[in-house]
Image: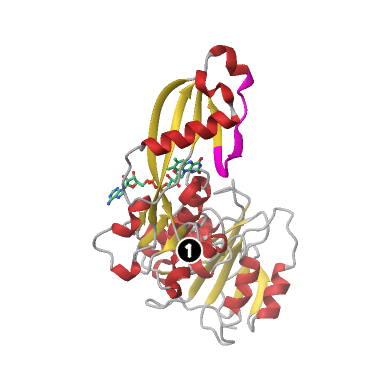
Amino acid sequence: MIASPARANTRDLVVIGCSAGGVEALPRVLQQLPEDLMAAVFIVQHLAPTGDRYLVGILSRACRLRVAWAEQGGRITYGSVIVAPPDLHMMFTDEHVSLTKAARENHARPSIDKLFRSAAAVHGSRVIGVLLTGMLDDGVAGLRAIREAGGIVIVQDPAGAAFPDLPARALLARDPVVWQVIVATGPWSSQLEGIPHELRPPVRPVKGEVLRLRVPEAYRPALRHVVRATARGFSVYLVPRPGGELVVGATSSELGYDTRVLAGGVFTLLRDARTVLPITDELEFVETIAGLRPATPDNAPILGPSGLDRLLWATGHYRNGVLLTPITAQLLADTVRTGGLPDLGKPFLGSRFEHAGH
Ligand SMILES: Cc1cc2nc3c(=O)[nH]c(=O)nc-3n(C[C@H](O)[C@H](O)[C@H](O)COP(=O)(O)OP(=O)(O)OC[C@H]3O[C@@H](n4cnc5c(N)ncnc54)[C@H](O)[C@@H]3O)c2cc1C
């Protein structure tokens, strides 16, 4: 092993930061480094303050370089991998390492940002900053400092990271103008101009009508629960609303984008409501409404990549769009941040219809 000569134009100081998932990711990175590496490697892996001391052993077995915990005053040495100990920040002073118990940064000690920023400040363009898997954003600011000091930065592809949050944040911070479009145009999703016909989702409108009736004060205590029933073979539901209204729903008909309320729909709903609740006759009629449900061939939503760059679908929720709003928002937010639809959403990719002739 030789001490680094710190030559100009040499990138010989590699600083690696990772959080959740790092103990699995680090061996895969280190095993690729050659025995005669003409650089020194310094690692901050978030560990519990009382964290176990197995990490150095794990990394030693994975690579051909000397792996050791950092020591106060230790020298930057080629061919070595130095790991920040639990509960201590690791920084640089000249060619030496300094360990401190200064305040936590980003809730972490050791902090990735502290290592990266001190590497940038002291060693500038010598530095290669690498940010791997993790949560939150420790390391994102430090990576920027390395870049601004003339170093180079490498970020793990979030799609391949066990915890994509941290690398995704680093990418967003680097390229804040990254944009994606989520199309959530319900029953009109198949009509959008500018999208090639074969990539349009197979979503069609299914009309539904509902009635709103007002319940007299005297009956309200008895009408507190949602009632779902089958009347003459048709399903009907009665939903008491705060304020004394009762919603009766819902018809289902395929008449394209026609949202007129038809007499037949009102008749059906009143007839079925009356079968379930004979006092329907005594309720005040407030209004009728018709809406369109965005239905798909299998009645399940279409989520995620569309086949067009930067365009994602969140459509086809049919009868359950209100119910599924939170999980849809979460899945699409994760997709935007990480570049891939989480496993939970994969059964709902639009590509499932590709071979069905839709
Ligand atoms: C009678 C009835 C009862 C229902 N009851 C329930 C229920 O109890 N629980 C439940 O979970 N779901 C229920 N649903 C289903 C739910 O309403 C739908 O699943 C949900 O509305 C779908 O939401 P969305 O945002 O995808 O589409 P939509 O709510 O249809 O919204 C799409 C929006 O996109 C806009 N848009 C269309 N084209 C464009 C364009 N080119 N540019 C810009 N904007 C555009 C439209 O104007 C519209 O505002 C019911 C539906 C009906 C009709």
The answer to whether one can see residue 95 in this image is no
- Is 42 covered by the magenta stretch? no
Residue at 70% in and 79% down: 61
- Is 233 covered by the magenta stretch? yes
List the residue tagged with mark 1.
119
Q: Is residue 217 left or right of residue 172?
A: right
Residue type at numbered disc 1: Ala
Give whichever of 217, 77 is nearer the camera.
217
Q: Position of residue 129 (x, y in %)?
A: 47, 68
The answer to whether one can see residue 112 in this image is yes
Q: Residue furthest left?
A: 194
Give whichever of 32, 337 is nearer the camera.
337
Q: Residue furthest top?
A: 218
Q: Quadrant of residue 110?
A: bottom right
As drawn, 297 above or below 290: below
How many labels, in total? 1
SS at mark 1? helix
Q: Residues within 10 Å of mark 1 (few under 14, many from 20)?
A: many
Ligand 1 visible in quadrant: top left
Q: Quadrant of the N terminus?
A: bottom right
Q: Which residues are magenta?
A: 222-236
Q: Quadrant of residue 147?
A: bottom left
Label 1 within 8 A of ligand 1 by Cβ: no
Residue at 70% in and 68% down: 55
